Image: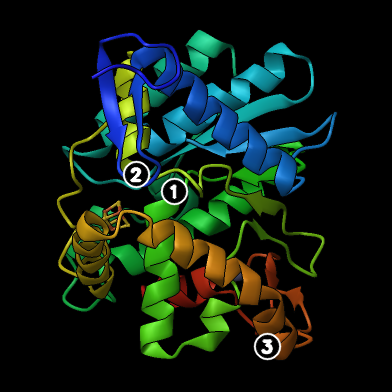
Amino acid sequence: MECTKCGNPDVIIERKASGQALCKDCFIKSIEKKVISTIKKENFIEKGDKVLVALSGGKDSVVTLEILNSYVERHIIELCAVTMDEGIAGYRNEGIEISKAHAERLGVPHKIVSFKDTFGISIDEIMALDEHRGSCTYCGVFRRWIINRVAREFGATKIVTGHNLDDETQAIMMNYLEGNVENLAKIGPKTESKSELFTVKIKPLREVPEHEIALYAEAKGLEVHSTPCPYAQASFRKEVANIMKDLSKEHPTIMYSTLRGFDKIRPAIRAEMSHNYEFDRCERCGEPSSNRLCRACTFLEELGK
Ligand code: SF4
Ligand code: ZN
């Protein structure tokens, strides 16, 4: 088999969805072109933006950093990065080291923020308690709290996350199946909020399938953290992920069509569900919140912190 772009016989991927076969160089170019075209189409980036990358050291965030760095080289944006240390022994350190190395290599200002220093408790300590809501619930809420704060500290105008096509279609299908229209309305390429204290979040990898991101990292020789978290458990999201993967075998365009279809009806869902949330400040931490306490502080009070 030959590369359908250049004829090179060393093909590294056959895309069933498009019938393309690509060699390493053409594959790398095709991913970069796709991400750049998503950025253009969604108006993600404006000249002068300071973009904060949520860098975990995993393939999605490392690839995001790598591709966005081409905008830095062209003097369009500035980059900065933040890595969370959730306090999970034997798991997070490797990701932190990999993140540090990539940030240093590209000269990107980088902060490492720990849950323990910020909230007085680590995920390991929470999981040792008799009563808790499950590690991932705290992780998600605490991470978002830190990212928003660090974005303001850096003076970032955008926050970029590494959500890929699989992540987006899983979120869409999960919320359809659960009938959770409120959450469905929140899915999309850009997360904007009425509160000025929240920074706009963008997802430049949302049209790239997960396995192609892994292949891009490998093709470019990028070191990534791939050890699974010890607390990762069976979840409804994983069940949906498996269904979508299975369907993709016989219907290779299914994730693309799920995303495209959703993007078409998204404005209608948003219009239907747009409540005028009154944002005030959390009484404890001063972050924006529609309740007396933000979710992070609600959890911290429950934990006695
Ligand atoms: Fe946190 Fe859950 Fe991810 Fe582990 S799997 S890092 S606990 S969100
Ligand atoms: Zn708070």
Q: Is residue 297 above or below residue 163?
A: below
Whole-angstrom CA distance, mark 3 to mark 1, is 25 Å
Going 21% across and 59% down the picture, which residue do you hit?
250
Q: Return the x and y of residue 105 as percentages of the image width and height.
A: 49, 9
Crowding at label 3, few (<14), some or many (≥20) Cα neighbours within 10 Å?
some
Going 71% across and 65% down the picture, which residue do you hit?
286
Whole-angstrom CA distance, mark 2 to mark 3, is 30 Å
Q: Which quarter of the rendered picture does the C terminus lie within? A: bottom left
Mark 3 or 1, nearer chain start: 1
Residue underneath mark 3: 273
Mark 2 or 3, nearer chain start: 2
Q: Toward the viewer: 75 or 245?
A: 245
Whole-angstrom CA distance, mark 1 to mark 2, is 6 Å
Going 30% across and 28% down the picture, which residue do you hit?
215
Type of the residue with mark 2: Glu
Crowding at label 2, few (<14), some or many (≥20) Cα neighbours within 10 Å?
some
Residue underneath mark 1: 164
Q: Return the x and y of residue 186 as percentages of the image width and height.
A: 60, 72
Residue underneath mark 2: 210
Q: Toward the viewer: 112 or 183?
A: 183
